[in-house]
């Protein structure tokens, strides 16, 4: 079995960002407009008035201070409250593929080898902008890579599921190097009209090159990978190709966002917190011990960036003490929740300071429920 190595990572960050204060101003303007338009129904008790959001509420609830987005103007328009991303022609590079290619080019530059040495491409993300052709194949074409490519979707855990898949391809000898990309346009499925979730997500793309150890120059040995899924409805998005088949005759086909909130991101946050934190902490500890590692001795945790309170509690449970900022990396204050890309951003930006032989953990968790752990060791 060939050892797999994380040889390089890449990151694409959109140019535009939205602060909590800007987001709140837009939401509150929308709420005021809604309340004025429905004043009669609100007074009669038929409709519930919308309450204001605040930057303080957002930061306390999530740890988020700002987020990067592809289109700021559309999100902050109280009459629209969603990004403007015009559909591209079939002969143009799609938006998701364009982001992935930029992240991949960053990873390839850091790798220092030509794209022709890549044997497979995996696009692992929470949302694909179309069913087919696969986004991964479009990325493959744009980068001039031969071999094979496919998409996979495991919500916020897509990156760790993609890393395991890539490592398994290396271990089996199927290919010598795999490109795994995570383009996330989370602003497109977020309901910016919902006070409890309008602040959660941001847009970004990450890329990871996984390579066979016998040809890798340096990087990070993948010591072990583990995946877990448990069905839950507490995080859900019902938008899909069967929606139009469920409509009565004469009704228009739905186009996101339809105003039907279940066709966008919805969650029961407190239930998710209660269910996921102990599941993930136990999974990390069990996997570490199976690999002969002391979880308390891990140098760094690169966790999924969903909520600062979740990450801090998982860190305490795994390390058995209060982690330092260096040990438990937090980047969601700048990036917000970027779904599958979050743990990879954390790893990409904060993997310095490791001596050869020191071990860290890349971990993701989210809808499904799904979770993945990838233990890595700095190579000599």
Image (cartoon, helix red, strand yellow):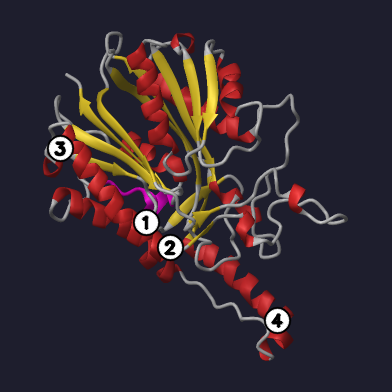
Q: Name the residue that disc number 1 marks.
A: 307
Residue range in magenta is 329-336
Q: CA distance from mark 1 to mark 4?
A: 33 Å
The quadrant the C terminus occupies is: top left
Q: Name the residue that disc number 4 marks.
A: 36
Position of residue 285 measured from the top left corner of the image (x, y, whole percent)? 19, 44
Determine whether label 1 and label 2 are within 8 Å by CB: yes
Residue shown at the point (38%, 14%) measured from the top left? 112
Position of residue 206 measured from the top left corner of the image (x, y, whole percent)? 45, 33
Q: CA distance from mark 1 to mark 3?
A: 26 Å
The quadrant the N terminus occupies is: top left
Q: Earlier in the sequence, mark 1 or mark 4?
A: 4
**330 in magenta:** yes
Q: Name the residue that disc number 3 marks.
A: 289
In terms of depth relative to the viewer, which is nearer, 61 or 162? Answer: 162
Q: Secondary structure at mark 3?
A: helix
Q: Earlier in the sequence, mark 2 or mark 4?
A: 4
Left or right? Give the position of 245 relative to 64. Answer: right
Q: CA distance from mark 1 to mark 2?
A: 10 Å
Residue 366 lies, with reference to residue 310, above or below; the image says above
Q: Name the residue that disc number 2 marks.
A: 269
Q: Earlier in the sequence, mark 2 or mark 3?
A: 2
- Judged from this view, the residue extending furthest toward the bottom is 44
Asked where in the image residue 277 lies, by quadrant, the reply is: bottom left
Residue shown at the point (27%, 21%) measured from the top left? 219
Determine whether label 4 and label 3 are within 8 Å by CB: no
Position of residue 22 measured from the top left corner of the image (x, y, whole percent)? 53, 63
């Amino acid at each position: 079995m060939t050892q797999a190595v994380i040889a390089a990572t890449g990151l694409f960050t959109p140019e535009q960002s939205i602060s909590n204060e800007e987001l709140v101003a837009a939401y509150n303007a929308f709420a005021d407009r809604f309340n004025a338009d429905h004043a009669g129904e609100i007074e009669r008790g038929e409709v519930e008035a919308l309450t204001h959001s605040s930057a303080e509420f957002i930061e306390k609830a999530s740890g988020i201070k700002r987020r990067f987005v592809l289109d700021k103007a559309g999100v902050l328009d109280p009459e629209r409250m969603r990004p403007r991303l015009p559909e591209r022609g079939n002969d143009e590079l799609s938006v998701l593929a364009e982001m992935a290619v930029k992240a991949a080019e960053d990873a390839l530059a850091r790798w220092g080898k030509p794209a022709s040495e890549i044997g497979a491409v995996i696009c692992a993300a929470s949302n694909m902008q179309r069913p087919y052709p696969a986004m991964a194949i479009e990325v493959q074409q744009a980068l001039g890579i031969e071999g094979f490519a496919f998409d996979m979707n495991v919500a916020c855990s897509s990156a760790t599921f993609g890393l395991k898949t890539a490592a398994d391809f290396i271990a089996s000898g199927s290919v010598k190097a795999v490109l795994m990309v995570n383009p996330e346009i989370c602003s497109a499925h977020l309901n910016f009209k919902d006070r409890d979730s309008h602040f959660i997500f941001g847009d970004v793309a990450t890329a990871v090159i996984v390579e066979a150890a016998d040809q890798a120059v340096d990087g990070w040995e993948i010591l072990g990978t583990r995946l877990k899924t448990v069905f839950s409805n507490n995080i859900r998005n019902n938008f899909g190709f069967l929606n139009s088949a469920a409509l009565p005759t004469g009704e228009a086909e739905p186009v996101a966002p339809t105003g039907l909130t279940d066709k966008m991101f919805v969650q029961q946050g407190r239930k998710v917190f209660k269910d996921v934190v102990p599941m993930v902490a136990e999974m990390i500890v069990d996997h570490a011990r199976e690999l002969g590692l002391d979880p308390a001795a891990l140098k760094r945790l690169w966790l999924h960036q969903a909520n600062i309170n979740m990450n801090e509690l998982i860190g305490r449970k795994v390390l058995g003490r209060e982690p330092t900022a260096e040990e438990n990396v937090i980047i969601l204050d700048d990036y917000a929740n970027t779904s599958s890309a979050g743990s990879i951003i954390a790893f990409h930006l904060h993997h310095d300071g490791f001596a050869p032989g020191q071990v860290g953990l890349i971990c993701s968790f989210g809808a499904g429920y799904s979770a993945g752990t990838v233990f890595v060791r700095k190579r000599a």
